[in-house]
Every structure is written in structure tokens, then in C-alpha cells.
Image (cartoon, helix red, strand yellow):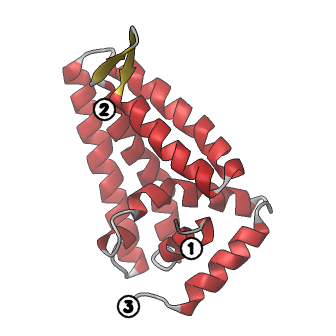
Amino acid sequence: MKTLEEQMSFYLRYHRNPKNKLTHFVGVPLIMFSLFVLLALVRINVGGFSISAATVLAVVVLIYYFRLDAVLAAAMTLFVAVLLVGAHGIASEGVRPALVVFVATFVGGWALQLIGHVFEGKKPALMDNFFQVFIAPIFLMAEVFFAFGYKRDVAERMEQMATRSEPN
């Protein structure tokens, strides 16, 4: 498994422009939320409990994040919990309202992402490595930590790896 810095350095190569980063700070959570809303409609009964597919996806991704970095994963857990609560609330209103919210947030989130890449002048990282869709959220959380002066060692290693080979 690649390290946190290896994963995020690849992502960083496609996300240098501040306007692109800003669009991603809104677009990525919108896309996450949209998928949680859609998947919250799918319920699985496990041992007498009803669990949504959104919760299953969140747990699987968070386990991966914990394997990369426990502190960032803990912060992501809080963020994901907020998104899940909202998504489940919307899904509980019924299929039609949930689908409207899903489409609006999914399309809006991706539109922001694509606008950001116009500013960047580079294609999205997922075009070269689809797995980057899972790295984007933890990358943004790491950026928040970096802005407050935390995880500087991670930021430095990530930057060193990213500058070795920038994409076209």
C-alpha cells in the first residue's frame, strides 16, 4: 500500500492553483454528500439492524484513511459523520426529495471540480488514477491541518515527492 505522502503527492501535482483548491473545498464535500444521500436510500439488514450503504461505504473508506494516518482519519470521521447525518435525514424524506438533492449536489460538485481544473490548466487527477477520488477528501483535510501549522512533516514530504514529476 502506498503511503499517505505518496497518495497525496500524486493528487497535489494536479492541484496547485489556489482557485482550483477553493473549488475543491466546496466540490468534493458536495460530491461526497450527494453519494451519501443516494446510498442512504439503500438499506441492509444486519443482525436486526438496518444499515445504509452510505454507512458501509463511509466505514470502508475511513478504515483505509486510518491505515494512512490516524489523526487525519479521526478528523475525517467527524466530518463524514456530519455528512452522513445530513444524508440520512434527506433520505428519510423519501426517494424523490433524495434524488433531487443527489442530482443537484452531484452535478454542482462536479461542475465546481471542472471549473477548478480550468483555473489549474490540468486535467483532474482521477483521469490518470481513478483511485484519487478517495484521496481528495483526506487531501483537503490535510490542507486544513497544514494551514494551521500541523502535520508540517507530511506536507514537506508530500511536496518533495510532488515536485519530482509534475503532470503535463
Left or right? Give the position of 110 relative to 30.
left
Label ID, residue 6: 1
Residue bearing mark 3 = 168
The location of residue 143, given as percent across then percent down, is: 64, 62
- Separation (CA) of disc 1 from disc 2: 30 Å
State how far apart marks 2 and 3 are (Cα): 35 Å
Circle 2 residues within 10 Å: few <14, some 14–19, many ≥20: many
Residue at horizontal 56 percent and vertical 61 percent from the top: 139
Residue at the top extreme of this rendering: 48
Q: Nearer the viewer, residue 120 or 146?
A: 146
Q: Foreground residue, 140 or 25?
A: 140
Split into 4 quadrants, where in the image is the C terminus? bottom left
Mark 1 vs mark 2: give the one in front.
1
Q: Nearer the viewer, residue 138 or 65?
A: 65
**Residue at (49% x, 76% y) in the render:** 10
- Residue type at mark 2 is Leu
Instruction: Determine crowd level at label 1: few under 14, some 14-19, many 20+ residues with C-alpha closer than 10 A.
Output: some
From this view, report whether residue 144 is shown above or below residue 55: below
Left or right: 2 as drawn, with respect to 28: right
Instruction: State which quadrant residue 63 falls in.
Output: top right
Question: Quarter-wise, where is residue 96 in the image?
Answer: top left
Q: Amino acid at mark 1?
A: Glu
Against 65, residue 160 (above or below) is below
Residue receiving disc 2? 39
Looking at numbered disc 3 in the image, what kind of residue is underneath it?
A: Asn
Count of labels in the image: 3
- SS at mark 3? loop
